[in-house]
Image (cartoon, grey):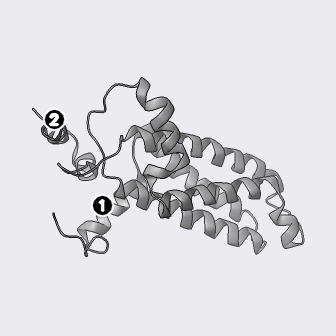
Amino acid sequence: MTTNDSRSAGTTQLSGSKAALAAKPGQAGIDPRGPRFGAGITAVLLLTVIGLGLDAAAALPATIAERASQPEFILFAVIAALFAWGAFVGIQRHPYGLFFKAAIRPRLSVPSHLEDPRPPTFSQGVGFVITVIGIVLHLAAVPYALVIFAGLAFIAAFLNSVFDYCLGCQLYVLLVRARVVGRGRTAA
């Protein structure tokens, strides 16, 4: 049995939502544990933003420069930049993915299946949009905006890292089924 045959045999045993995310035979896939690893790091960082932001959320500093220099804002901006990296450069070249591939993946067993990289990459774009909205509203002095949008991103990252449920990936699958994304692609 070839590698592609074993992959397709493994995908038939996946649940419906996981089978929709699996890489198709002949398609380059990623280890699904990589995005989960990155989501775990992101969840911890977002929880830190929430913790730091709760102290100062009610009484925001008067100027944009003061709001932009708050530690929780700086960390949130770094997280937004990491989401942008994953969304625009690709999940395969994201810093967490590269670290996972180089340092952690060699120590693990072979994954039961490979995942299509497009849904997790789309999910990074969703995370980017959510964090950018939080950044803009925080700079506009909307109380608790940073904490609320960090909380939304945390929920998604937590679900992915702990329960292997990627909200952005599921949204991608729904949009593909509705023919909103992926229209221009044809099967090779």
The C terminus sits in image quarter: bottom left
| Front tag of 1 and 2 | 2
Disc 1 to disc 2: CB gap under 8 Å: no
From the viewer's perspective, tell me whether residue 94 is left or right of residue 65: left
Real-space Cα separation, disc 1 to disc 2, in angstroms: 23 Å
Can you say which quadrant of the picture contains the N terminus?
Answer: top left
| Residue occupying the point 42% across, 61% down | 122
Q: Residue at x 81, y 61 (%)?
A: 58
Q: Residue at x 16, y 41 (%)?
A: 4
- When the figure is inspected, residue 30 is found, relative to residue 185, above or below; the finding is above
Q: Residues within 10 Å of mark 2 (few under 14, many from 20)?
A: few
Height in image: 159 above or below 131?
above
In the image as oriented, which residue stretches furthest toward the left? 1
**Can residue 67 be seen in this snapshot?**
yes
| Depth check, front residue: 124 or 142 | 124
Location of residue 135 by image quarter? bottom right
In this view, the residue in front, 121 or 94, is 94
Q: What residue type is disc 2 on?
A: Ser
Relative image position of residue 145 (x, y in whole percent): 69, 65
Find numbered disc 1 in the image and state the secondary structure of the residue it sits on: helix
Q: Which residue is mark 1?
A: 173
* Residue 186 drawn at (x, y percent): 18, 69
Q: Percent position (x, y) of residue 140? A: 76, 75
Viewer can see residue 60:
no
Q: Which residue is mark 2?
A: 6
- The amino acid at mark 1 is Val
Identify the residue at image location x=30%, y=75%: 180
